[in-house]
Image: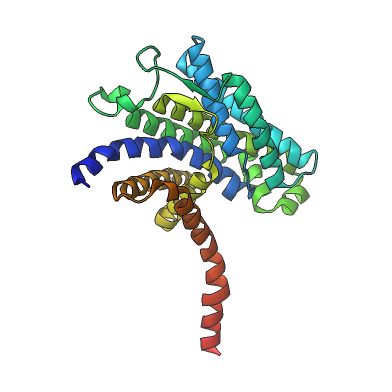
Amino acid sequence: MSVISLINSLPGAVAQGLIWGIMAIGVYLTFRILDFADLTVDGSLCTGGAVCIMMMLSGQNVWVSLLCAALAGMAAGFCTGILHTFMGIPAILSGILTQLGLYSVNLKIMGKANQAINVDKYDLLVSLRFIRNVPLFKNSIVLVAVIILLLIAVLYWFFGTELGCSIRATGGNDRMARAQGINADFNRVLGLMISNGLVALCGALLSQYQGFADINMGRGAIVIGLAAVIIGEAVFGKVFHNFGFRLLGVAFGSIIYYLVLQVVIWLGIDTDLLKLLSAAVVAVFLAVPTWKGKYFKGTSKGGKS
C-alpha cells in the first residue's frame, strides 16, 4: 500500500473522471432539467463506443467517428422519447425498453461482444498512454477538459435561447408549459436526444481511452452519472448558482467520484463491492431532502410549539 502508487494512479483517475463527466452532464439534463428518469444511458453509452470504434476500424477519421457516435446516441434518445410521448409508456419503462433493444443493436454494430482498437495503428484522440510524457496538446486530460468546456459553453448558450428555455419550462412544470403554448412532448424528446447524444459521446471517448468497446461497458452507467450529479451538487451547489457553473460542478463531481474510487481501490477494499457502495451513496444523498423535510423540519416545529 504505497502512497507513491496512489499518486501515480491519480492522473488516470482524473482523465477517466473527466470522460465520465460528459455522461454525467447528460444525466443532469434529464434528471434535473427534464425531471425524467432516463435509463437509456446504460445502452446508449455502449452504442457510442461501438459506433466510434467500428468506424475508426473501417478507416474513418476520429472526429467523424465521434460525430456519428453522438448522432447514434441522439437516435437512441429519440426512440425513448417516442415511446414515452407518442406511445404513452411511462418514463422508466421507455428507457428500459430502449436500453434492452440497444443490447442487440450494439451486438450487431460490433459483430461480437468486444472490439479492440490499437493506439499504435489508429489515430486516437485520447488514450491511457496519453497521460504522461506527451505534448500538452495530446494529453488526454487537457483534451477532454477542453471538450467539456466547449460543451458547457454550447449548452449554456442553447438553454438560454427560447427553445432551451421552453425545455427547462417543460421539466419545471409540464402543465404550465402546455398552458403557455409550449409543445412539451417535442421538448421532452429533444431533451432526451441531447442527453443521450452526450452519453454516446462519452462512450466514444471512453472506448478510445481504454482501447476497446465492450457490450457491457454501459452497465451501471446511470448509477455513476447520478453519483457524479449528486456529489457535484453537494460539494459545489452553494458556490455554483449559474447554470453553466452547475454543469461544471457535475463534471467536477465525476472527477471526485473517480478519485475516491481510486483511493478505495488503493486501500484494498474488495472491488466487487464498488457498485454496491456507489448505489448506497446515491440512495443516501437522494434521501437527504426527504429526511430534512420529514424529520428535521417537524422537529423544529415541535420545538417552537
Q: Is 296 placed left or right of 18 in the picture?
A: right
Residue sitting at the far bottom:
305
Looking at the picture, does residue 296 appear above or below residue 166?
A: below
Q: Residue at x 34, y 14 (%)?
A: 120
Residue 126 lies, in percent from the top left, at 38, 25
Q: Residue at x 47, y 44 (%)?
A: 247
Residue 147 lies, in percent from the top left, at 42, 30
Front-most of 273 and 282? 273
Quarter of the view holding residue 148: top left
Looking at the picture, does residue 4 appear above or below residue 154?
A: below
Q: Is residue 183 visible?
A: no
Residue 272 lies, in percent from the top left, at 43, 47
Q: Is residue 286 visible?
A: yes
Q: Residue at x 47, y 48 (%)?
A: 275
Quarter of the view holding residue 188: top right
Looking at the picture, does residue 120 appear above or below residue 14?
A: above
Front-most of 216 and 84? 216
